[in-house]
Amino acid sequence: MPEKLNSTSFFNQYRFWIIFLSAALVVEIPIISLPLKWFESYFHEISHGIAALLTGGSIINIQLFPNGAGLCTTRGGSRLLISFFGYAGAVFWGVAIYYVAAMHQRIAQLFSALILILLLTTLIFWIRDLLSFSIMSVLLMIIVLKFKLENLQYFQMLLQLIGCSVLLNSLKSPWYLIDGRSLGDGASLAQLTGMPEILWVCLWFMLGVIGVLKLAQVKRR
């Protein structure tokens, strides 16, 4: 019994790092990693879309691809904020998902219901192609199936795993923009502001690091 208590205490003490490292391992496993990559892509693209809506623009459509890439096509709004909030929004979503899941089991369920509504709204209004529809359907199914888990601790852990994978992606993905092709959000921001792309990449990375450090201090309630 003491050994079991010690192992439980160890897990709770280092819960974030264990789940974060687990997410880092899972996203490297072929096929199994695909749903996590689709969640990562979705929260990046919907962040672009939300920025467009909040600055007076509109979402034309959202596309998700099997390899984890995505595209959000918008009209109007602030191009600067829309470009910035793809990666910045992913940091927010990653932190929010993990933090809320750590608060309370019932709150985690409620937050999952809100994510479910967001996914459904996206599917109904902004998905235009069969491939994206299929990927979104898988994400919806995952969220729905999580409500079937009898042990709410597993529910929390799975939600935290998704949050960590989204946050992890926000740390890694910006660096892929440094490819000399002047494409993507960083290049767009560089054109709009005159600030080098690498500065925007470093800013996104630092936001992700701050998110990681903040979550490492979160205690399970």
Image: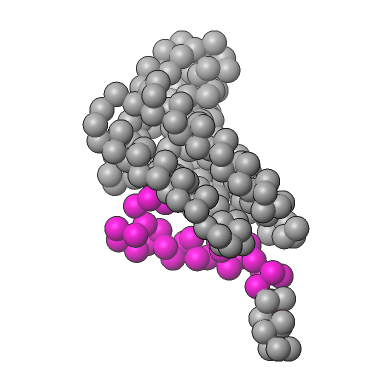
Residue closer to the observer: 120 or 201: 120
Residue 31 is inside the magenta segment: yes
Residue 184 visible, this angle: yes
Residue 75 versus residue 11 in the image, above or below = above
- Identify which residue is drawn at 29% across, 24% down: 128
Residue 56 is inside the magenta segment: no
Residue 164 visible, this angle: no
- Identify which residue is drawn at 73% across, 89% down: 2
Horizontal arrangement in the rendering, residue 113 relative to residue 126 (left or right): right
Residue 18 versus residue 91 in the image, above or below = below
Judged from this view, the residue extending furthest toward the left is 130
Q: Quadrant of the N terminus?
A: bottom right
Give the number of marks.
Answer: 0
Q: Position of residue 144 (x, y in %)?
A: 46, 45
Q: Position of residue 217 (x, y in %)?
A: 73, 58
Decide whether the magenta segment is chiefly helix, strand or loop: helix
Residue closer to the observer: 200 or 210: 210
Q: Position of residue 93 (x, y in %)?
A: 57, 41
Residue 124 versus residue 78 in the image, above or below = below
Residue closer to the observer: 35 or 213: 35
* Quadrant of the image occupied by residue 102: bottom right
- Identify which residue is drawn at 72% across, 60% down: 220
- Identify which residue is drawn at 54% across, 23% down: 51
Boundaries of the magenta span: 10-38
Q: Position of residue 146 (x, y in %)?
A: 49, 52
